[in-house]
Image (cartoon, helix red, strand yellow):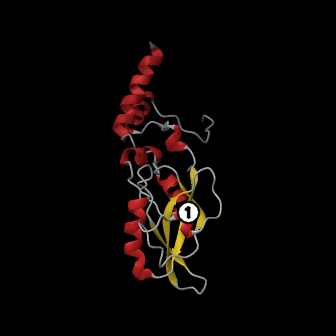
Amino acid sequence: MEPTSGFAEQPGPVKAESEEQEPAQWQALPVLSEQQSGAVELILAYAAPVLDKRQTSRLLREVSAVYPLPAQPHLKRVRPSRSAGGAQSSDLLLCLAGPSAGPRSLAELLPRPAVDPRGLGTPFLVPVPARPPLTRSQFEEARAHWPTSFHEDKQVTSALAGQLFSTQERAAMQTHMERAVCA
């Protein structure tokens, strides 16, 4: 009687057949641009609490006309917040702060008569995302600072999840790579 080990050897043809059925044991990793893989860049902007919510629509219209944000279309102009008493309120994004950011009054920030500041509280500085988020993780980070719109790129999302290529596509890539290495 031959000694037995804990491992059984399979005949050659069966092993080759099972390799064709199994998916390749490697994973395609996406190579993302610096914008897609980097952290969210923040810039300073001025915002002010909306004290009278009935004025929100008018304030939004007037501020947006005076301070359009063409380079930041991803930023929402109004964010919900909680006041000191726990009541629901909101903050209005006024404008970007620029290099000489510092405390400013509504009179300094909002030109009269284009914007009637009734209904707004004292302005404050807030960090906001400088560019639109390109990945889900960037979106999560960006919205922690200020509400942001996000248009997901399904191909990038599936690449990050490791689902860009099907089993058949990976098997074909494996075959082509083996041929290239042999050559």
Q: Specify the quadrant that holds the C terminus.
A: top left
In this orientation, does residue 148 appear? yes
Up-down relation of residue 73 to residue 31 (above or below): below
Residue ID at (62%, 39%):
5
The x, y position of residue 16, in whole percent, is 41, 30
Outermost residue, left direction? 168
The x, y position of residue 82, in whole percent, is 55, 79
Which sits in the foreground, 93 or 154? 93
Residue under circle 1?
A: 46
Up-down relation of residue 59 to residue 144 (above or below): below
Quadrant housing residue 53:
bottom left
Residue ID at (42%, 44%):
156
The x, y position of residue 11, in whole percent, is 45, 30
Within-10-Å neighbours for mark 1: few <14, some 14–19, many 20+: many
Q: Is residue 124 left or right of residue 159?
A: right
Up-down relation of residue 40 to residue 148 (above or below): above
The x, y position of residue 28, in whole percent, is 47, 37
Residue ID at (46%, 15%):
182
Q: What count of labels does the image hold?
A: 1
- Residue type marked 1: Tyr
Quadrant housing residue 127:
bottom right
Residue ID at (42%, 68%):
113
In this orientation, does residue 13 appear? no
SS for callout 1 = strand
Which sits in the foreground, 143 or 122? 122
Quadrant housing residue 63:
bottom left
Which sits in the foreground, 37 or 68? 68
Q: Is residue 7 left or right of residue 112?
A: right
Q: Specify the quadrant that holds the N terminus.
A: top right
